[in-house]
Amino acid sequence: PLDTFHVPRRLARTVRQGKFEIRVNHDFRAVMEGCAERETTWINEEIIEAYTALHRQGFAHCVESWRDGRMVGGIYGVAIRGLFAGESMFSRETDASRVALVEMIARLRKGGYQLFDVQYTNHHLVQFGVVRVPREEYHARLARALEVQSSFPTE
Protein backbone atom coordinates (compact mmCIF):
# COMPACT_ATOMS: atom_id res chain seq x y z
CA PRO A 1 0.00 0.00 0.00
CA LEU A 2 1.19 3.53 -0.78
CA ASP A 3 0.04 4.88 2.58
CA THR A 4 2.69 2.95 4.54
CA PHE A 5 5.65 4.04 2.40
CA HIS A 6 8.26 6.22 4.09
CA VAL A 7 11.78 7.35 3.18
CA PRO A 8 14.63 6.46 5.55
CA ARG A 9 16.44 9.57 6.87
CA ARG A 10 19.80 8.89 5.23
CA LEU A 11 18.14 8.27 1.88
CA ALA A 12 16.06 11.45 2.22
CA ARG A 13 19.35 13.34 2.60
CA THR A 14 20.72 11.66 -0.55
CA VAL A 15 17.56 12.63 -2.46
CA ARG A 16 17.86 16.27 -1.29
CA GLN A 17 21.52 16.39 -2.36
CA GLY A 18 20.50 15.68 -5.95
CA LYS A 19 23.21 13.05 -6.38
CA PHE A 20 21.31 11.57 -9.36
CA GLU A 21 19.48 13.06 -12.30
CA ILE A 22 15.99 11.53 -12.46
CA ARG A 23 14.41 10.72 -15.80
CA VAL A 24 10.98 9.22 -16.38
CA ASN A 25 10.16 6.84 -19.25
CA HIS A 26 13.35 7.98 -21.00
CA ASP A 27 14.85 4.57 -21.84
CA PHE A 28 12.44 1.87 -20.74
CA ARG A 29 14.22 -0.96 -22.53
CA ALA A 30 17.55 -0.06 -20.88
CA VAL A 31 15.90 -0.22 -17.45
CA MET A 32 14.64 -3.71 -18.22
CA GLU A 33 18.06 -4.73 -19.51
CA GLY A 34 19.61 -3.38 -16.31
CA CYS A 35 17.17 -5.45 -14.27
CA ALA A 36 18.08 -8.52 -16.35
CA GLU A 37 21.82 -8.20 -15.60
CA ARG A 38 21.52 -10.44 -12.54
CA GLU A 39 23.06 -13.90 -12.58
CA THR A 40 19.61 -15.51 -12.34
CA THR A 41 16.61 -13.67 -13.75
CA TRP A 42 13.18 -14.25 -15.20
CA ILE A 43 13.69 -11.31 -17.57
CA ASN A 44 14.66 -12.61 -21.02
CA GLU A 45 14.38 -11.04 -24.49
CA GLU A 46 10.77 -12.22 -24.92
CA ILE A 47 9.78 -10.60 -21.62
CA ILE A 48 11.63 -7.40 -22.52
CA GLU A 49 9.75 -7.23 -25.84
CA ALA A 50 6.38 -7.83 -24.13
CA TYR A 51 6.92 -5.15 -21.46
CA THR A 52 8.34 -2.73 -24.01
CA ALA A 53 5.11 -3.16 -26.00
CA LEU A 54 3.13 -2.40 -22.82
CA HIS A 55 5.29 0.69 -22.37
CA ARG A 56 4.56 1.88 -25.92
CA GLN A 57 0.84 1.42 -25.18
CA GLY A 58 1.12 3.54 -22.01
CA PHE A 59 0.72 0.73 -19.46
CA ALA A 60 4.33 0.24 -18.30
CA HIS A 61 6.48 3.01 -16.85
CA CYS A 62 9.95 3.49 -15.46
CA VAL A 63 11.94 5.90 -13.35
CA GLU A 64 15.67 6.09 -13.98
CA SER A 65 18.63 7.40 -11.98
CA TRP A 66 21.42 8.89 -14.09
CA ARG A 67 24.88 10.20 -13.25
CA ASP A 68 27.51 11.61 -15.59
CA GLY A 69 25.46 10.70 -18.67
CA ARG A 70 24.88 7.04 -17.82
CA MET A 71 21.97 5.20 -16.30
CA VAL A 72 23.01 3.83 -12.90
CA GLY A 73 19.68 2.60 -11.55
CA GLY A 74 16.01 2.27 -12.25
CA ILE A 75 12.66 0.70 -11.53
CA TYR A 76 9.78 -0.30 -13.80
CA GLY A 77 6.29 -1.67 -13.51
CA VAL A 78 2.81 -1.87 -14.97
CA ALA A 79 -0.12 0.46 -14.30
CA ILE A 80 -3.73 -0.69 -14.42
CA ARG A 81 -6.16 1.99 -13.28
CA GLY A 82 -5.29 2.68 -9.57
CA LEU A 83 -2.84 -0.24 -9.32
CA PHE A 84 0.86 -0.05 -10.03
CA ALA A 85 2.67 -3.39 -10.00
CA GLY A 86 6.38 -2.88 -9.47
CA GLU A 87 8.18 -5.54 -11.47
CA SER A 88 11.91 -5.07 -10.90
CA MET A 89 14.64 -2.58 -10.11
CA PHE A 90 18.42 -2.43 -10.46
CA SER A 91 21.34 -0.42 -9.19
CA ARG A 92 24.87 0.07 -10.45
CA GLU A 93 25.70 2.65 -7.78
CA THR A 94 24.79 2.89 -4.12
CA ASP A 95 21.28 4.32 -3.63
CA ALA A 96 20.55 4.67 -7.37
CA SER A 97 17.59 2.26 -7.34
CA ARG A 98 16.40 3.53 -3.96
CA VAL A 99 16.28 7.12 -5.22
CA ALA A 100 14.37 5.92 -8.29
CA LEU A 101 11.92 4.11 -6.00
CA VAL A 102 11.34 7.27 -3.94
CA GLU A 103 10.59 9.20 -7.15
CA MET A 104 8.31 6.41 -8.39
CA ILE A 105 6.27 6.54 -5.18
CA ALA A 106 6.00 10.35 -5.37
CA ARG A 107 4.66 10.07 -8.92
CA LEU A 108 2.21 7.30 -8.03
CA ARG A 109 0.82 9.41 -5.18
CA LYS A 110 0.58 12.47 -7.45
CA GLY A 111 -1.15 10.40 -10.14
CA GLY A 112 -3.83 9.14 -7.75
CA TYR A 113 -2.72 5.51 -7.54
CA GLN A 114 -4.17 3.56 -4.63
CA LEU A 115 -2.04 0.42 -4.55
CA PHE A 116 1.65 -0.26 -5.20
CA ASP A 117 2.13 -4.03 -5.42
CA VAL A 118 5.77 -5.00 -4.86
CA GLN A 119 4.80 -8.70 -5.15
CA TYR A 120 6.95 -9.86 -2.22
CA THR A 121 8.66 -8.32 0.78
CA ASN A 122 12.37 -8.35 1.44
CA HIS A 123 14.81 -6.50 3.71
CA HIS A 124 15.41 -3.87 1.03
CA LEU A 125 11.70 -3.00 0.79
CA VAL A 126 10.81 -3.35 4.49
CA GLN A 127 12.98 -0.30 5.28
CA PHE A 128 10.46 1.76 3.26
CA GLY A 129 7.49 0.52 5.29
CA VAL A 130 6.44 -2.20 2.84
CA VAL A 131 4.16 -4.64 4.62
CA ARG A 132 2.78 -8.03 3.71
CA VAL A 133 -0.98 -7.78 3.20
CA PRO A 134 -3.20 -10.80 3.87
CA ARG A 135 -4.86 -12.21 0.75
CA GLU A 136 -8.41 -11.10 1.64
CA GLU A 137 -7.27 -7.55 2.42
CA TYR A 138 -5.21 -7.46 -0.77
CA HIS A 139 -8.22 -8.49 -2.86
CA ALA A 140 -10.31 -5.74 -1.23
CA ARG A 141 -7.58 -3.13 -1.82
CA LEU A 142 -7.13 -4.33 -5.39
CA ALA A 143 -10.87 -4.08 -6.09
CA ARG A 144 -10.90 -0.49 -4.78
CA ALA A 145 -7.77 0.41 -6.78
CA LEU A 146 -9.27 -0.94 -10.00
CA GLU A 147 -12.25 1.40 -9.56
CA VAL A 148 -9.96 4.44 -9.60
CA GLN A 149 -8.83 6.15 -12.79
CA SER A 150 -5.18 7.13 -12.31
CA SER A 151 -2.64 8.74 -14.59
CA PHE A 152 1.13 8.27 -14.42
CA PRO A 153 2.71 11.75 -14.30
CA THR A 154 5.66 12.02 -16.67
CA GLU A 155 6.40 15.71 -16.05
Image (cartoon, helix red, strand yellow):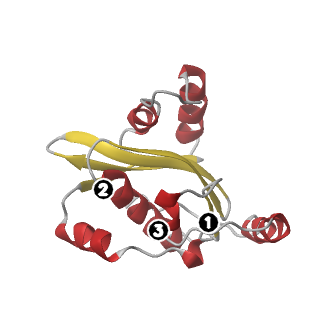
Distance between mark 2 and mark 1 Cα atoms: 28 Å
Residue labelled with disc 2: 95
Q: Is residue 123 above or below residue 131?
A: above
Marks 2 and 1, the one that precedes in the sequence: 2
Residue labelled with disc 3: 127
Distance between mark 1 and mark 3 Cα atoms: 26 Å
- Along the line of sight, which residue is nearer the eye, 131 or 150? 131
What residue lies at 58% left-to-right and 41% top-to-bottom?
Answer: 57
Residue 61 visible, this angle: no
* Numbered mark located on residue 150 in the image: 1
Marks 1 and 3, the one that precedes in the sequence: 3
Q: Are marks 2 and 1 in contact (CB under 8 Å)?
A: no
Amino acid type, label 2: Asp
Marks 3 and 2, the one that precedes in the sequence: 2
- Along the line of sight, which residue is nearer the eye, 95 or 74? 95
Distance between mark 3 and mark 2 Cα atoms: 13 Å
Q: Is residue 71 above or below residue 117?
A: above
Q: Determine whether the residue tagged by mark 1 lies in a helix, strand or loop.
A: loop
- Residue 69 is situated, as x and y percent measured from the top left of the image, at 17, 41
- Residue 3 is situated, as x and y percent measured from the top left of the image, at 58, 78
Single out the residue that lies furthest toward the left. Answer: 68
- Residue 35 is situated, as x and y percent measured from the top left of the image, at 45, 37
What residue lies at 55% left-to-right and 48% top-to-bottom?
Answer: 77
Q: Determine whether the residue tagged by mark 3 lies in a helix, strand or loop.
A: loop
Splitting the image into 4 quarters, where does residue 14 fall? bottom left
Q: Is residue 12 above or below residue 48?
A: below
Splitting the image into 4 quarters, where does residue 28 fall? top left
- Which quadrant is the C terminus positioned in? bottom left
* Numbered mark located on residue 72 in the image: none
Amino acid type, label 1: Ser
